[in-house]
Image: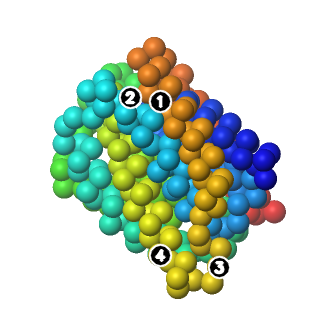
Amino acid sequence: MEWTMSAGLAAGLLISMVTAPVGVSGAVFLLPVQLSVLGVPSPAVTPTNLLFNVVAGPGALWRYRRDGALRGPLARRLVIWTLPGVAAGAAVRVFVLPGPDVFRLLIAALLGPLGLWLCIRTRRPVGKRPPAEAAAAPSPAALSVLALCVGVVGGIYGIGGGSLLGPILAARGLPLAVIAPATLAATFTTSVAGAAVYTALTLVSTGPVAPDWWLGLACGLGGLIGGYLGARLQPHLPETALRLLLGILATALGAVYAAQTLT
């Protein structure tokens, strides 16, 4: 028990410190650690991951707010439209996709393409793309639909959706200084809602649906510290290197889980 808590704390701290500067809570990378290393059962791993987001989120958000980066309509729109999506995704996760094999395949399907896309887009910065590719930010309607869909996926996966919204918006040409605070705000609020939905679903489900509270809190405490440090270091970190690192990690983790599912 003590080893598990310490490992969760360390994992949350290190992952969040790397991912917070690009607007990702780190839950997308913590989830495989919980499944394979810490032994959290499925589907309880999803609400445990959401609990991590709830505890870890305020660290980076407080720093971004202090720097004045949490202003503008982007954060409000993402929060409003991802909230109903994450509630629907939680229900799908419990009643449609409870098995670990299907869940691992879903992880691989999400992480692999996401990582490759992030690497490709990073190697071709917006300023060097042809004019047709250097598109403007999505329209308010398109952004709302995108946030809703990502909320559903985030509710299933336990990531709040920020790790999907971030690369998509970055590929559209928005700067990370705008994206990071907005996606982290959406991740935090949807994770609060998702964790509450999973807790309510324990009343109607016989499986391991409730989060692992102690482990989620331990990982979240590490993420709280790491997220604050990552947000504070953002202006001093090379953006290209961080994006490539995230892309490589996502692609590698997706490949590992695809191999585990198919063998």
> As rendered, which of 43 and 128 lies closer to the eye?
43
| Sequence-earlier tag: 2 or 4 | 2
Q: CA–CA distance between discs 1 and 3?
A: 35 Å
Tell me the residue at 62%/66% (across/down).
44
Q: CA–CA distance between discs 1 and 2?
A: 6 Å
| Sequence-earlier tag: 1 or 2 | 2
Q: Is residue 165 above or below residue 155?
A: above
Tell me the residue at 35%/44% (across/down).
185
> How many marks overall?
4
Q: In terms of secondary structure, where does tag 3 sit?
A: loop
| Sequence-earlier tag: 1 or 4 | 4
Quadrant in the rendering for residue 190: bottom left
Q: In terms of secondary structure, where does tag 2 sit?
A: helix
> Residue 75 location in percent, x, y?
27, 44
Query: In front: mark 3 or mark 2?
Result: 2
Quadrant position of the C terminus in the picture: bottom right
Q: Neighbour class for label 1 at 10 Å: few (<14), some, many (≥20)?
A: many
Q: Amino acid at mark 4?
A: Ala
Quadrant in the rendering for residue 14: top right
The disc placed on residue 207 is 3
| Sequence-earlier tag: 4 or 3 | 4
Q: Which residue is mark 4?
A: 200
Q: Which residue is mark 1?
A: 228
Q: Amino acid at mark 1?
A: Tyr
Whether tag 1 and tag 3 are in contact, CB under 8 A, the answer is no
Q: Amino acid at mark 2?
A: Arg
> Residue 240 location in percent, x, y?
48, 22
> Residue 89 location in percent, x, y?
45, 68
Q: Which residue is mark 2?
A: 63
Q: CA–CA distance between discs 1 and 4?
A: 30 Å
